[in-house]
Image (tube, rainbow, N blue to C red):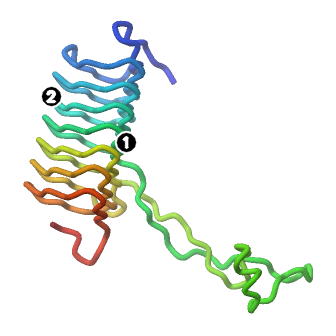
Amino acid sequence: MRSIRWLRTGATVHASARVHPSACLAPGAVVQARAYVGPGCVLGPNAVVGTGVSVGQGTSVGPNVTLQHCVIGARCTLHAGVHVGADGFGFLPGAPGGRDGADGDSPSAGSLHDRGLGIVLPGDSLPVKKPQLLQVILGQDVEVGAGSCIDRGSWRNTVVGDHTKLDNLVQVYYIWFISMYVCIQTFSSWWRQSDSTF
């Protein structure tokens, strides 16, 4: 990875990234290729702004925050340990797997003991990862509490509207669209249903 050292603070910035001169980068912060960090932004220690990510003006990114596959609006606050843009938990039924029984060692399908050991039997369907290829879009003035995760979309972007507030330890699954001015309390888990709009 071609990178340059942000000499003033010890952060690492890729040569193709754009960081506004008024941004403040703490030691250990990393800005990867083609990323953008706007005016007045603050990146805490060990924060990572991933490839192609855009962070809007005046946004505060806390320590150990990871931003991937996302666009962050202006004046957002992302507290310590937030993860935005990771893959969601999406899997599809795959091809049948398991032993074919040709070697004579295949356990019987009725054996609960063997099932408890995690053995894949003939005819079992193995999960295949569903591609998560889209982004997370955070609006302006969004606040995300410590340890929260917002997954990126698979067939549409995950969107968090302007002025939305997420408490600590909130999980927003992929493809959700959360409107403006929404408050979500801690230990909430917002997952995909037939209508994923709030």
Foreground pick, 101 / 188: 188
Image height of 38 relative to 81, above or below: above
Count of picture labels? 2
Tag 2 residue: 58
Image-based side of 141 in relation to 109, left or right? left
Q: Residue furthest bottom?
A: 110
Residue at the image position 42 percent from the left and 12 percent from the top: 5
Outermost residue to the top: 8
Residue 143 lies, in percent from the top left, at: 18, 44
Which SS class for mark 1? loop
**Could you tell me the amino acid type at mark 2?**
Gly
Please tell me which of labels 2 and 1 falls first in the chain: 2
Q: Which residue is mark 1?
A: 68
What residue is at 92 percent from the left and 83 percent from the top? 104
Residue count near mark 2 (Cα–Cα under 10 Å), binned few <14, some 14–19, many ≥20: many
Query: x%, y% of residue 105?
Result: 89, 80
Amino acid type, callout 1: Gln
Q: Secondary structure at mark 2?
A: loop
> What residue appears at the point 89 percent right and 82 percent down from the top-left corner?
102
Query: Which residue is pictured at 15% across the width and 66% down the height?
Result: 198
Snapshot quadrant of residue 34: top left
The vertical placement of 54 against 170, above or below, is above
- The Cα atoms of the two marked residues, 2 and 1, are separated by 19 Å
Q: Which of pointers 2 and 1 indicates the residue nearer the eye?
A: 2
Report the disc number at residue 59. Answer: none
> Are dots 2 and 1 in contact, CB under 8 Å?
no
Q: Is residue 190 left or right of residue 117?
A: left
* Label 1, residues with CA under 10 Å away: few <14, some 14-19, many ≥20: many
Residue 140: % across, % down: 12, 42
Q: Position of residue 80 (x, y in %)?
A: 32, 37
